[in-house]
Amino acid sequence: MEDAYLVLSKLTKTYPNQPRPAVRDVDIDVARGEFISLLGPSGCGKTTTLRMIAGLIVPTSGGIRVGRVDMTNRPVHKRDMGMVFQSYALFPHMSVGENVDFGLQMRRIPKSERRRRVAEALDMVHLTHLANRRVSQLSGGQAQRIALARALVIEPTVLLLDEPLSNLDAKLREELRVEIRRIQQETGITTVFVTHDQDEALAMSDRLVVMSEGRVEQVGEPWAVYETPRNRFVADFIGRTNLFDGLAVGRDDGLLRVAVEGLGTLSVRTPETGRTSVTVMVRPHRVQLEPVEQLANELKGRVVQSSYLGDVESVVVEVDGVRITAERTHSGRPLALGAEVRLGWGDTDAYVIPQ
Amino acid sequence: MDGVTRMRTSSRSSGGRTSRAARAALLAPGLVAIGVSFLVPLAWLARMSLNRTVGSAELQSAVSPQSYVDVLTDEFVWKIAWQTLQLGVLVTVLAIAVSYPIALFLARTRSRLRGLLMALAIAPLLTSSVVRTFGWLTLLSDDGVVNSVLSGLGVTSEPLTLTNNRTGVVIALVEIMMPYAIIAMIAGFGRVSKDLEDAAGSLGAGRLRCFLRITFPLSLPGVLTGALMVFVLTISAFVTPRLMGGGRVFVIATEIFDQATTTLDWPRASALSILLLFLFGVFLVLYQRLFRLVEGR
């Protein structure tokens, strides 16, 4: 990337006595002002990567650069990065105001300026009235906002967020999601966000980095990662999905014909892949139950499972031994178990995974 | 001890499930033990302190403040009380200072050897302080290991006087108190956390400032608890001052022993004991005040 601001190159971390590196050859370029999420299951190396950026973990090899400055061997306190911890990590022996002030004190900034900047930071998170509170008197959401204010008041080069929302309840999480994104866009700060929650990552990020077993599996805009996963892991990890392994048996007019055991031959609109053994992905919300129009792929099956979730109904239909998950919106009364249903999807609703 | 009780009660089970009677029954053995082994003797001690001694060690039953008056107007008692306090403060400061790094390390390490190191740190408690004091006597005496090495290396021409004086008492007491200091401090280091230190680092604090502004203030509850423990044990210590002091170091505890066994003035010994107890009370209150201050409540 030409205008890359935060650059990780071949970043690797190997722990002694562990056969597999925790992070392996991670290359990520983050543009100035970009919000990027590291997403993956626990143990995928996303937090290790973030902590290497912060300077809390020394990489085994590889480099970290911010702008033109090489950060790889710089100690944490000289990196000028703001970090928000999962545990908030507010200093319990200081008031809210003193917490926010701490980073400014470390920079030996004159008192009058410190007072102004602390006030501005608290105002940004709408918690000016809590300046004199003790940290122990804050709610989880308030503590998280203060942690954010404390990280941003030092005007860091990069903002690092380590699962900042995972200790909050669902409603608050959504609220803070919007707020963090608002503040990030207002300040224009380059942000790296670590999460295992794909909804969070999809909703907040400019780009996603999907990681697994210490490696980067895919980097891209949320919609692109969701719609066109690069491999089976990403397809499976991001969103719910149906994956069918089959053989490419023919091709005409941009349509690939794939023979799948139990389902017959499926039609998928896809560019040439050149491979015979392929995996077809169909997202559950693309599967139509009792379709009214003619579809490229139509099947018949029996309902074996149904979960009513309010806004959608998630239905599992078994077609000749193959289970297909579909989502019904505006569902009304849920489908009865054992009911015979028709289902189908168009040739553009499916996607052939490249690897 | 406010801090300690609070830590204990936080792990209690929800109260609703055990009935009042069951709770009383569960508490009974402990209460009886405390009553028989502590409260009854204490009451007996208080009663004894009001008796009188006439002639040469003849005990006379009475209700008289005479022994308190005698004790409080005796310049020698004030002198040894002052010496006891000095010894207490000195040993406390030194024992905490040398134990602090060990306790902090043990509280934070994630090494697999943590359990072993912990056991090693408190293993000295397995031997009695009498044995350990004799150990120090052989190490520090005029022809002991320390002096042999020093004179053998030509560092000293005359042996250093390290026993039968206050120096020896302090050295031995500091070592004897270390396991207590370490245990008490580790228990009080609950608020010290890696995340907070990492956060301070990311905000621009180097190692020293991180320690001074974050780690040390957060470790104060542990330091205070350890200090109280060491101080109380030191000012009531008898064996070590007696043996290492060689009869030349006087503290309240040795004075009580002398009064009870040599002079046979039991009322005076009892009055001294009650005064020592009063001193404990004063320091407990002081500790609680300080604890609240450092916990920021």
Image (cartoon, coloured by chain):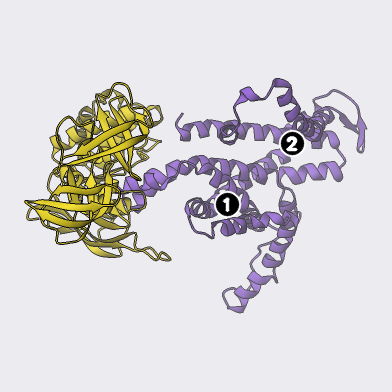
Q: Nearer the viewer, residue A194 or B241?
A: A194
- Residue A78 drawn above or below residue B8: below
Quarter the N terminus of chain A occupies: bottom left
> Label 2 sits on what residue type?
Asp
Where does the image place residue A186, in percent across and percent down from the top left?
13, 34
Q: Which mark is in front, 2 or 1?
A: 1
- Residue B201 drawn above or below residue B224: below
Chain that bears disc 1: B
In the shown orientation, is residue A70 left or right of residue B158? left
* C-beta proximity under 8 Å, tags 2 and 1: no
Q: Residue at point 72% right, 39% down?
A: B77
Q: Residue at point 16% right, 47% down?
A: A267
Q: Nearer the viewer, residue B242 or B81?
A: B242
Residue linked to disc 1: B95
- Residue B89 drawn above or below residue A115: below
Chain that bears disc 2: B
Residue linked to disc 2: B74
Q: CA distance from mark 2 to mark 1?
A: 31 Å
Where does the image place residue B278, in percent across and percent down from the top left?
68, 32
Q: Colour of chain B?
A: purple
Where does the image place residue B164, in percent across and percent down from the top left?
71, 59
Quarter the C terminus of chain A occupies: bottom left
In the figure, the yellow chain has which letter?
A
Callout 2: helix, strand or loop? loop
